[in-house]
Amino acid sequence: MFFGKETAEEYQLNPEKMPKHIAIIMDGNGRWATKRALPRKAGHKAGAEALEKIIYAAKDMGLEHLTVYAFSTENWKRSEEEVGAIMDLLRMYLKNYFKKFLNDNVRMDVIGDISRLDKDIQDAILEIEEISKTKTGLSVHIALNYGGRDELRRAVGKIAADIAEGRLNPTDVTEDVITNALDTAGTPDPELVIRTSGEERISNFLLWQIAYSEFYFSEVLWPDFDKTELQKAIYYYQNRERRFGGRLK
Ligand code: IPE
Ligand code: IPE
Ligand code: MG
């Protein structure tokens, strides 16, 4: 799987073939905690710390966009205790910690339907998005109460309203019109999607945007995912052949 390589130095990346956008399904926090006989919330805390490091690694590598799946529309099915712990962690990061990224010229925004989140969390998100407008570095997109189907449902609603109010003809609904009605409008599609923890499914992440993405599945649990693991994933991507339905020669 890893080309028989052992150390980070062996995963030499080609600067000319760097992806612009990587999307990550950060999975395995619960199993990480269970393995250590800790409560699941300790896994989520360790997961948030791993994300901090990956944001800086992505910035150092010169990526333009990083989209991370933090909470899905399906994750509300978890126990009240676990959802509460995730929301508390989110609140803490949004109000305190994320400002540090902004000071380092990182831009941040949220994709997903934030209207279901507590008001103070929504306000913190809007404030971060406002400050981000003045930043020019890596864009970090956090998927919160995000579901690919829910995003498409909301996009269809917007397009239907444009048609009903006479701003758009049904025959003018191009792929670009749909792309621009999604939460990810303005962000190029991810070239690479990474999922940690050994699961190999998409779990309702970025359904429209991944039409031609490459996939990389890592056995590593998210709290253990680090810069070397990210480098491996990019190395793997750089050594794949992307065809987009055509032929190379
Ligand atoms: C991912 O880790 C974080 C969220 C979904 C919020 P999990 O909590 O899904 O961890 P596992 O899959 O149970 O190990
Ligand atoms: C996907 O992980 C969502 C996030 C990482 C936020 P899940 O752990 O919720 O996905 P399933 O339940 O294994 O499909
Ligand atoms: Mg999981």
Image: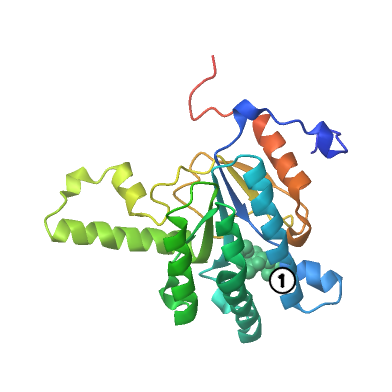
> In the displayed image of the protein, which residue is found farthest to the bottom?
80
Q: Which residue is mark 1?
A: 45
Residue 158, percent from left and from top:
27, 60
At x 57% / y 57%, what residue is drawn?
Answer: 103
Residue 151, percent from left and from top:
41, 61
The amino acid type of the residue labelled 1 equals Lys
| Direction from residue 72 to residue 200 in the image, left or right | right
Q: Residues within 10 Å of mark 1 (few under 14, many from 20)?
A: some
Instruction: Looking at the picture, tell me which residue is in the foreground, 117 or 179.
Output: 117
Q: How many numbered circles are shown?
A: 1
* Vertical position of residue 151 compared to residue 78: above or below: above
| Direction from residue 123 to residue 165 in the image, left or right | left
At x 70% / y 35%, what residue is drawn?
Answer: 236
Circle 1 SS class: helix
Indicate which quadrant contains ligand 2: bottom right
> In the displayed image of the protein, which residue is found farthest to the top?
249
| Direction from residue 101 to residue 130 in the image, left or right | left
At x 55% / y 51%, what residue is drawn?
Answer: 105
Would you identify the image quadrant in which residue 47 lies?
A: bottom right
Residue 189, percent from left and from top:
48, 43
Q: Is residue 195 visible?
A: no
Would you identify the image quadrant in which residue 30 lies?
A: bottom right
Instruction: Looking at the picture, tell me which residue is in the foreground, 123 or 173.
Output: 123
Q: Is residue 60 visible?
A: yes
